[in-house]
Amino acid sequence: MTDKKFYIETYGCQMNFADSEIVNSILLEEGMKPVHEAEEADVVLVNTCSIRENAETKVWNRLKELRSIKKENGELTVGVLGCMAERIKDKIIEQEHLVDIVVGPDAYRDIPRLLEEVDDGRKAVNVLLSLEETYADIAPVRTTGNGVNAFVSIMRGCDNMCAFCVVPFTRGRERSRPMESILREIKELSDQGYKEVTLLGQNVNSYLDGENTFTKLMDEASKVDPEMRFRFSSPHPKDFPDDLLHLIAERPNLCNYIHIPAQAGSDTMLERMRRPYTREQYLDLVEKMKSIIPRVSLSTDIIAGFCDETEEEHQQTMSLMKEVEYDLAYMFAYSERERTLAHRKFEDNVPEDVKKKRLSEIITQQMEIQARRNQNEIGNRHVVLVEGTSKRSDEQMSGRTDTNKMVVFDRKDFKPGDYVEVEITGATSATLLARPIGKTTLQDYYGAEVAAA
Ligand code: 5AD
Ligand code: SF4
């Protein structure tokens, strides 16, 4: 196995990117060498996403491209990892030369053995899901990041069973990673100079390790390094803990930003989606967030055109979004997935053009809200964590506020990982422009609050 060159490419959510870092670690441990392009590799692994049809289409197209590279280089091994593994498993029997190895999200430790099977001329498959695997003892190897932000996976799988969602089937049952292994990883990241950690899980507020809840985990994490910022994704509106809101309000390094997926704005639709909360309960939660954390910034996920959606239900989604005024929203047209409750019980009966029209209404309204909210930022001061040079110009740096807004400002002598106090001078719907005031630290900037906490 040693000496083989490998390349991993990743599609889908942050959780998938975190998983690729685990696979990285497993392959490096085997003595394999990472390369930067598929063309240079002996083994190409594609970490895949199934969440919507177009996510899968992207992967299928890429696999076809890889097949043509394979035709020129007969030695190339192509593997599929992640959420599409189960589905691809069935297809590799029919499509002879597509891929050599298929590995589900809980079987990554088995990759070295599977690669050996391929060397012996067999196809190798392991898509078994596990009730325990959390890869707690594997230290992810981060090769693609900026050295400032890191993702740390705190749990795997999902038990929510929202009617539209394939994740419980691709990633299996929910399980939490032991708290001490998470805290150890955070400490190592802090020692390596990372400045921001996002804790990841499909449903972080049901995190449970013995007595340790998600609030306890955030409490302990924030104390590991007071100059390290923490975010998390994603919580569920159904059992969001109050004590976490108070903790976020108190601690300067817990970001005032919460991603709180609503999915829809009417009780009838929420019920069909099997989302166990009402519009009123959701709005009450949002009110509580805004009152306990006055500067809080909120984002959400919305699905347009789910089964049987009426115009009235669509309008309620629009009105919910207007009422909350999210700073950011991820908005999707419903895409039917096999095995889900919706696939088994309901009909995907909102015509494609109606889905598109509703989605575009939702997006247009949201862009207006964002543009307005960003305009209102002009004159405000923020602490920005510098992530790198701006995409547009080398003379500018970019980074995010505590409230997760992207800010661009003059380079001066700022470096990635610096905290810079800025004053906002301009805005678009996606980015804020600012005048840098000077370097700072969380403890200096929020000094008084730290002393009180
Ligand atoms: N169709 C469209 N969007 C979906 N999501 C999950 N499943 C589907 C689907 N079948 C969206 C949800 C979820 C986000 C990660 O993706 O909004 O919160
Ligand atoms: Fe992530 Fe869901 Fe896509 Fe899997 S299906 S990669 S969990 S977004």
Image (tube, grey):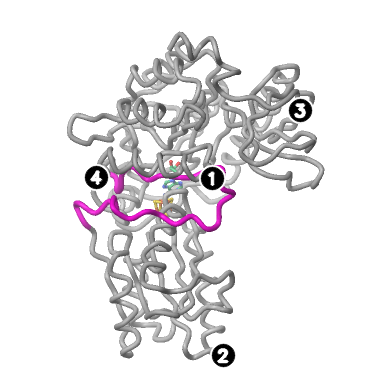
- Pick the front one: 102 or 168: 102
Image location (x, y in percent) of residue 69:
56, 83
Of callouts 1 and 4, which one flags the residue occurring earlier in the amino acid sequence?
Answer: 4
* Vertical relation: 361 (above or below) 374: below
Under tag 3, what secondary structure? Answer: strand
Relative placement, left or right, of 265 versus 357 is: left
Please tell me in which quadrant of the rendered image residue 419 appears: top right
What residue is pinned by disc 2?
72
**Secondary structure type for disc 2:** helix
Secondary structure beneath disc 4? strand
Q: Amino acid at mark 4?
A: Arg
Where in the figure is residue 35, as x and y percent of width and height? Answer: 55, 71
Instruction: Report if the beta carbon of the residue with label 1 is closer than 8 angstroms to ligand 1.
Output: no
Which residue is denoted by mark 1 in the rendering?
Answer: 355
Q: Amino acid at mark 1?
A: Lys
Residue 394 horizontal side relative to residue 289, left or right: right
Disc 3 to disc 2, C-alpha distance: 51 Å
- Whole-angstrom CA distance, mark 1 to mark 2, is 42 Å
**What residue occupies the far front of the structure in this picture?**
191
Q: According to the image, label 3 marks what residue?
A: 434
**What residue is drawn where x is 58% and y is 79%?**
39
Disc 3 to disc 4, C-alpha distance = 42 Å
Q: Tell me the distance, in whole angstroms, between the alpha carbons under discs 4 and 2.
A: 43 Å
Foreground disc of the pair 1, 3: 3
Question: Which secondary structure class fits the magenta region best?
Answer: loop
Other residues around mark 2 within 10 Å, as few (<14) / some (14–19) / many (≥20): few
**Which residue occupies the foreground of this view, 272 or 211?**
211
Q: Earlier in the sequence, mark 4 or mark 2?
A: 2
Q: Quadrant of residue 328?
A: top right
Q: Amino acid at mark 3?
A: Ala
Q: Which residue is mark 4?
A: 175
Disc 1 + disc 4, Cβ < 8 Å: no
